[in-house]
Image (spheres, grey):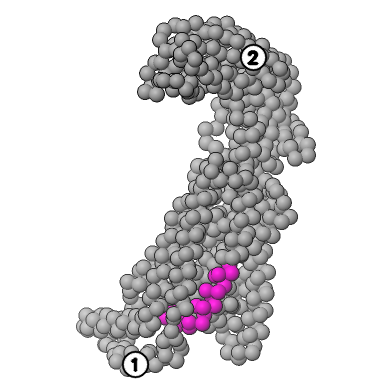
Amino acid sequence: MTATAPRLRTTASRSLTRLLLVTVALLGALFAGAVPASAHAALTGSDPKEGAVVATAPAQVALTFSEGVALDANSIRVLDPTGKRSDTAELVNLCSGDVVKYGVRLRTGIPNGTYTVAWQAISADSHPVSGAFTFSIGAPSATTAVVPTQAVGGGLVGALYGIARYAAYGGFVLLTGGAAFVLACWRRGATVGPVQRVVVGGWLTMTAATLAMLLLRTPYTGSGKLSDAFDLNGLRAVLETKPGAALISRLLLLGAAALFVSVLFGAYAKREDEAEKKDLTFGLAIGGAVVAAGLAATWALAEHASTGLQPGIAMPVDVLHLLAVATWLGGLVTLLVVLYRSPRIERAAVLRFSRIAFWSVAVLAATGVYQSWRQVGTWSALVDTVYGQLLLVKVGLVAVLVGTASVSRRWTARLSEHTAPEADAALVVEERASEPEPVTVPDDGKDAKRAAQLARQQAALSTAREKRIRDADPERTGLRRTVLAEAGIAVVLLAVTTVLTSTEPARTQEAVDKAKAGSQVAVADRPVDIRLPFDTGGQNGKGTVELTLDPGRTGSNDLRVSLEDPAGKPKDAPEVKVSFTLAAKSVGPLPVVPDRVTAGQWKASGVQIPMAGDWQISVTVRTSEIDETTVDKNVKIG
């Protein structure tokens, strides 16, 4: 038999393998940062309000959301103190203009006590949201109502759906960016095996991820049970929704992409006539661009770009954003593979990709500014919300990444043509002249050790030859290192982006905060507690006041006030006064002068709150004959 050298992994190959594993893992989540973050709908209000105590049973319970949602008859459930359903399971559409509001009617004759409202909905951006709160009729009571402890869209199903979602993004990046690299930068790459594997791997990954999302959609938005992934009735219901239609459309477009890939690595790769190849390149570029734009549109049309502010502008901008990201990052991955696995790429091809990457980043910057404005809204939200703060960190990391890419561009400009095809051929001939021919040994097992030894020698010579070809241009080594540095920065960016995609967008968060008017909601079954710093301006005038209103609802309440110094010790004062004002009804201020119990402690009983509303509680502290201050806090009572 003929003993030939097996293909051994070089150090560079092992490094490339690790790099590709990291790249595939980060592409999806990194790419998710390129699209608007998962802007889930938020509950901005309810009637009755959370924690409210109402005198008589309302006719219905209504919920207000920050954006459009999809609900059914079981999306809003009202449970009595024993855990039984008290609503009629009739969903009432109360939407008006820009107000998204839905409700359910309550049964007649329901008893007094504490009721639990459990709700679940699908945001307009296709993400499930859920929550629960309580209100009381007559007076608070104990309740045995049980609501799911796991948020919808969480658990194992949520994790699997998230992995599939990010894998779909990563597959799109590799498929689109790899094909664009071949057609726009290096046509000869269509015949290179590693490049083919990048593009085909992207198609396979995206197809598998899309199928997984389609099957997981039912448990992801519903029960959370993995077994429901194969529920045919649930799958039929999913296909009738906007996300389901988008996933089916994506699969159909992936069929067209399979035809594109087969032509690219088949007829196109084998075409030798330059004129014919040029015409075919144009045709493939147009067809590939249409398919890539269609794939990108399946995200834009089904997720947050399709809702909220200016959807008619946001959706095409989102498509451009996705295509720019795929062209840049997918091309970068393909270039890495070529630099490590195929040393015969021309300098001109690298320069072409460098220019394309530059314009891709320009498109990313322009579209990213618009998307950030849609998600953040105000300058103050950049520093006052978690989403804004994370966005600032991400912008900083992107700036560092672009700076590193500029270093790569300088290395690219210094590349020589030492590894042009003619030089490659000469170097390969030189190396092969000193390479021993494959050794043929009798197939009797006696010379197995000798055959293995010769095979290892041939493998070492082959590895050395490939290394000499790769290192013929020293600038190429510098380029590989800076591109690796880009990948390292991208790993850090991955962590920030992963958190960002699961954080409530700043614009939505501000809307929720505004709806709540900065008030503290009084919960019916426990007292209202507020804690405020004060400074009367005099010597030893700083401290903290703590106030408790129990039970924190309309009618009679007990009031307790305590003062602490900056060290946390009780602080006495000559006088402490409290007043209550309901500005919306022009009630108050209602003065209360609590009695001193001990040093730093005051108390008053029978404090009457005549009606429910947003009350301003003001506390006046006097620490000397002339040093006095008043601090206040808004709370929602009853």
Q: Nearer the viewer, residue 335 or 121?
A: 335
Percent of width and height locating residue 595: 49, 5
Which range is magenta?
Answer: 341-360
Percent of width and height locating residue 182: 55, 77
The kind of secondary structure the magenta stretch mainly shows is helix
Q: Is 416 situated left or right of 362 in this image?
A: left
Tell me if residue 225 is in the magenta stretch.
Answer: no
Q: Is 498 situated left or right of 89 in this image?
A: left
Percent of width and height locating residue 532: 50, 23
Q: In the image, what residue occupies the spot 64% across and 63% down?
A: 320
For marks 1 and 2, give the CA distance.
97 Å
Q: Nearer the viewer, residue 433 or 612?
A: 612
Label 1: which residue?
430
Q: Quadrant of the N terminus?
A: bottom left
On the question of residue 241 being in view, the answer is no
Q: Nearer the viewer, residue 553 or 531?
A: 531
Do labels 1 and 2 touch, CB within 8 Å? no
| Discs 1/2, front | 2
Q: Is residue 108 above or below residue 296?
A: above
Residue kind at label 1, given as amino acid type: Glu
Label 2: which residue?
589
Circle 2 Cα neighbour tier, 10 Å, few/some/many (<14 / 14–19 / ≥20): some
